[in-house]
Image: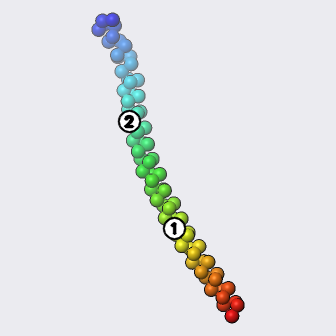
Amino acid sequence: MDLSQLTPIISSLGFPIAACIALFYYLNKERENHKEEIDTLKNCINENNNVLSALKTLLESIERRIDNIGRD
């Protein structure tokens, strides 16, 4: 295979190869951004769990006080 046979192959495959490379780059960037978003959501969920746990403890404490007042 000489250069004259190779040139049409490269010219016909050049755009698809370039498009595949661009798409690969774009998908990797999107994956990185998505990972950052997921990490942020995980942190928010963990913080919400902590707040809910504190609220549960507070409500249980209030419930015990009300029960103690009712017994007096």
Name the front one of labels 1 and 2: 1
Q: Residues within 10 Å of mark 1 (few under 14, many from 20)?
A: few
Q: Residues within 10 Å of mark 2 (few under 14, many from 20)?
A: few
Image: 68 above or below 29: below
Q: Secondary structure at mark 2?
A: helix
Residue 44 location (% of width, % of height): 48, 61
Specify the label residue 50 is tagged with: 1
Query: Residue placed at 39% from the left, 28% from the top?
Result: 19
The disc, 1 or 2, on the residue closer to the chain's N-terminal end is 2
Residue furthest to the right in view is 71
Specify the label residue 25 is tagged with: 2
Residue furthest to the bottom in view is 72
Quadrant occupied by the C terminus? bottom right
Q: Nearer the viewer, residue 53 or 15?
A: 53
Query: Residue placed at 51% from the left, 60% from the top?
Result: 45
Residue 68 location (% of width, % of height): 66, 88
Identified by mark 2, the residue type is Tyr
Query: Residue placed at 49% from the left, 64% from the top?
Result: 47
Q: Nearer the viewer, residue 12 or 56?
A: 56
Q: CA distance from mark 1 to mark 2?
A: 38 Å
Image quadrant in which you'd find residue 6: top left
Q: Secondary structure at mark 1?
A: helix
Query: Residue placed at 38% from the left, 30% from the top?
Result: 21
Residue 69 location (% of width, % of height): 66, 90
Quadrant occupied by the N terminus? top left
Image quadrant in which you'd find residue 10: top left
Asked if the residue under mark 2 is in contact with the one under mark 1, i.e. CB atoms within 8 Å, the reply is no
Identified by mark 1, the residue type is Asn
Residue 12 location (% of width, % of height): 38, 16
